[in-house]
Amino acid sequence: MPLQTLFRSTLLLACCLPAWAASPSPTAFQPSEWAVLQSPRADRRHTSSRGIVQTMLEQVRPACAFQPGMPPENFPSWREQVRQAMKKLMKFPASQEIQPPRLVKTVSRQGYRVEKWESYPFPNAAVPFLVLVPDSATPQRPAPVLFCIPGSDQTKEELAAETSAELENSPLPRPSPNAMAWHYVREGWVAVVVDNAGAGEQGDAEHAAGRASHDYDNLARLLLEMDWSWLGYTSYTDQCILDWVKKLPFIQKSHIILSGFSLGTEPMMVLGVLNPDIYAFVYNDFLCRTLERAQTMTKPSANGSRPAPNSIRHLIPGFWQQFDFPDIVASLAPRPVICTEGGLDRDFGLIAQAYRMAGREDAFRFLHQPRFADPAKRWQGERLPSGLDRTEFFRLANVDPRNHFFKKDAVIPWIKSLLNAEQTAERPADSQQPAVASESPATP
């Protein structure tokens, strides 16, 4: 092509490009100026679709939000409203006869045994899980049971201090604090430990490729496309195992405790709402309002991308229209709960009011991270400011990501205080009444 013709073609192409194709100078964009979604128009209407959706987001009011001003006699009916809403959101498959779990392998450890089992929640599924049984637990002397749910990229083997999925090697000689199930069984308690959906033995090709992380997002997308969710799926597989655990002869059926770490607190909350016979709950993560997180984390990066409040595996269509995390924890009252990694005093105060309304304020306990132990260092207010990035959100929400691990030194004494104050006689399966707790709550 002659040089003159090439020049004319290039000039014509440049003239035909739309205005938005011209990228502004990188130095012209200041993220702080775009932190809050605002319309420059006099009528305050947004032309940005993101701005329009932000306006919708600001107007969401969860139908099952806990209302501290409700009459105490209305609390049980509100709690049932939360339970029914959770059932609809989780979309568990219709009740059906499923094959009972099968014992795959048993190995002896010092003071306990590890059993590997498989659950069969679907016709084409085999879901492995572990049961750690102390030598002292027998049908004649049943023990409390801790149902352990890992955090993101954790495996059941990590929580059990095991080094192989097939239990072929010796356990870790010095387990980390995150070996939740191991710490529990050493106390003489039965520990059941599962993998989250898509993690550990439930993972996929990423392991063969040498990746340490798990591909939750692709799995979550497929489930969403099928009108389900990652949380609905993983909670259902956990529920199938939990139903079986309740029938074990060597466990105290009146002392089933759910223990969730990080990501595992989400299925823990689901199971807690759907199973009124659960005795107590370990919430080992920070507590926040996820709707508020989405409303306020709007500060874009240097390339103009606004942060997602969380990854796709946390998405449950319709969730925000019903409730948020503090509402769910409040609905667990009067059963004992400990929250171990802080959050806003505002939210803990809300939950404490629910426990007072249920007549058991002493059954709720929360701890702040050492960085925010001094109340003067904690943000106080009714609503977080808009225009935050992730780091700013964590700081204002009193979260210290560097100090995120299983708080065994707080959790185990708390559980002991509950069990020591409770007669081991079995309570009715549908009872909502917790044991008398001797440990004083942390009041906001």
Image: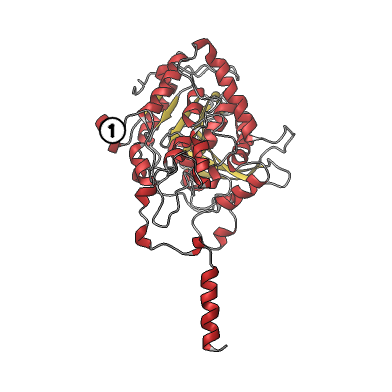
Residue 98 appears in the rendering: yes
Residue 123 lies left or right of residue 42; in this view the side is right
Residue 404: x, y in percent? Answer: 38, 42
* 115 lies above or below 85: below
Along the line of sight, the residue nearer the viewer: 354 or 180: 354
Residue 367: x, y in percent? Answer: 35, 30
* Residue lying at 64% horizontally and 46% vertically, measured from the top left: 223
Task: Kindly indicate the quadrant of the structure image that contains residue 131.
Answer: top right
Residue 135: x, y in percent? Answer: 50, 35
Residue 21: x, y in percent? Answer: 50, 63
- Say which amino acid is labelled 1: Ala
Query: How many numbered discs?
Result: 1
Q: What element carries label 1?
A: loop
Q: Name the residue under label 1.
A: 373
Residue 248 appears in the rendering: no
Q: In which quarter of the image is the N terminus?
A: bottom right
Along the line of sight, the residue nearer the viewer: 341 or 47: 47
Q: Quadrant of the C terminus?
A: top left
* Residue lying at 59% horizontally and 27% vertically, measured from the top left: 274
Along the line of sight, the residue nearer the viewer: 431 or 377: 377
* 416 lies above or below 435: below
* Residue count near mark 1 (Cα–Cα under 10 Å), binned few <14, some 14–19, many ≥20: few
* 51 lies above or below 15: above
* Residue lying at 61% horizontally and 38% vertically, measured from the top left: 232
